[in-house]
Image: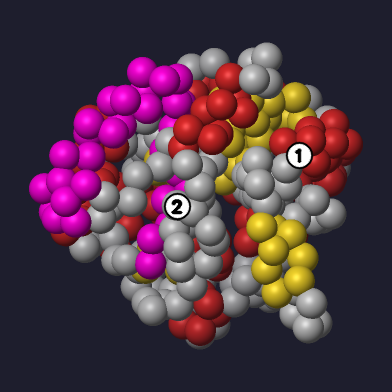
Amino acid sequence: MFFDIHAHVYKYPYRVPDGAGGTRYVMPTPEQLAVRHAELNITGAALLPVLGPELYVPQSVGELIDIADASGGKYVAFCNVDPRALTNSSDAPLGILFDQYVEQGCKGIGEVMPNMEWKDPKMQNLLRCAEKAGLPLLFDMTACLGCEYGIYDDPGMPQLEACLDRFPDLIFIGHGPAFWAEISTLREESDRRKYHPNYPIIAEGRVAYLMRRYKNLWVDLSAGSGANAMMRDMTYAGQFMREFSDRILFGTDICYPDQKVPQPKILFTLLDNGSITQDMFDDIARRNAYRLLKL
């Protein structure tokens, strides 16, 4: 029933602090991901390699290509390239890498999340090469520099808007706390740093404004940030999905095998109460991803 646009998997998961003085494994193995997907009625997924060292242990794109190739068509691989790769310059020939990954079957780029500004010349070079490669780009965004991970933008996301305008043929897929916080106008700027702003939608935020103005902006419902953006005001969530049902993508962003995934319940609730139609549900659940990734 569902296609997961935002899946992570490590052949060799690693241990991280658990917050209670011990450690736990982060990221599911291929076997663990298969179990969770079966439980959630997810029949296909895009596997996103993690490169950014700010929080996660980087992995090879080839690792995910191998896992996707062995899945019998269930999974497709995304590629990922750090903006500082090859020459650590604003004119690095990153297209060489993208061309190679396209030849190897990669269907998208992401999760792009270096802790850099959108306007950084190296980031602009990455976007320029990504647009030329013809692959959609899924990003994570943050509200601070020098913190863990995510592309930085100012309140109102003016740098993202400039990129949407400058690279009209590049599909951007929005994700992350600082992005989804702006589904509403903000009570205060610090709300952009919160993973779960808990007040209802005050007034329409910048997410809808940007989607309405720039047809190359899509969104990813995955993780707590995407789920919270919908659950904080389900009436507005129905309105948002009705207007943008052709550019919303179902996703999970499962980083721990036992992670809760509320996205299916959100969609079924909105379908059952008449907020969205069956066609809208099907588009968001899987058909938009098939169309975007040319599956």
| Amino acid found under the numbered disc labelled 1 | Leu
Quarter holding residue 134: top left
Q: Is residue 248 shown left or right of residue 136?
A: right
Task: Check if residue 171 falls in the magenta segment.
Answer: no
Residue 100 numbered tag? none
- Reading the image, the residue beneath label 2 is 51
- Please say if 261 is above or below 142: above
Q: Position of residue 57 (x, y in %)?
A: 53, 58
- Residue drawn where x is 77% and y is 65% of the image: 24
Quarter holding residue 230: bottom right
- Please say if 272 is above or below 159: above
Residue 33 numbered tag? 1
C-alpha separation, residue under disc 2 versus residue under disc 1: 19 Å
Q: Position of residue 178 (x, y in %)?
A: 49, 67
Q: In which quarter of the image is the C terminus?
A: top right
Q: Where is residue 203 in the image (x, y as percent from the top left)?
A: 55, 68
Give the mark nearer the N terminus: 2 vs 1: 1
Mark 1 element type: helix
- Examine the rendering and report whether any part of residue 280 can be seen: no
Nearer the observer, 215 or 18: 18
Mark 2 element type: loop
- Please say if 125 is above or below 201: above
| Amino acid found under the numbered disc labelled 2 | Leu
Q: Within 10 Å of the Cα at label 1, are there few (<14), some (14-19), or many (20+) other Cα atoms?
A: many
Q: Position of residue 85 (x, y in %)?
A: 26, 50
From which residue to which does the magenta span run? 86-115
- Examine the rendering and report whether any part of residue 55 can be seen: yes
Q: Within 10 Å of the Cα at label 2, are there few (<14), some (14-19), or many (20+) other Cα atoms?
A: many
Does the residue at mark 2 contact the one at mark 1 (Cβ under 8 Å)? Answer: no
Nearer the observer, 129 or 9: 9
Instruction: Identify the colour scheme used.
Output: secondary structure
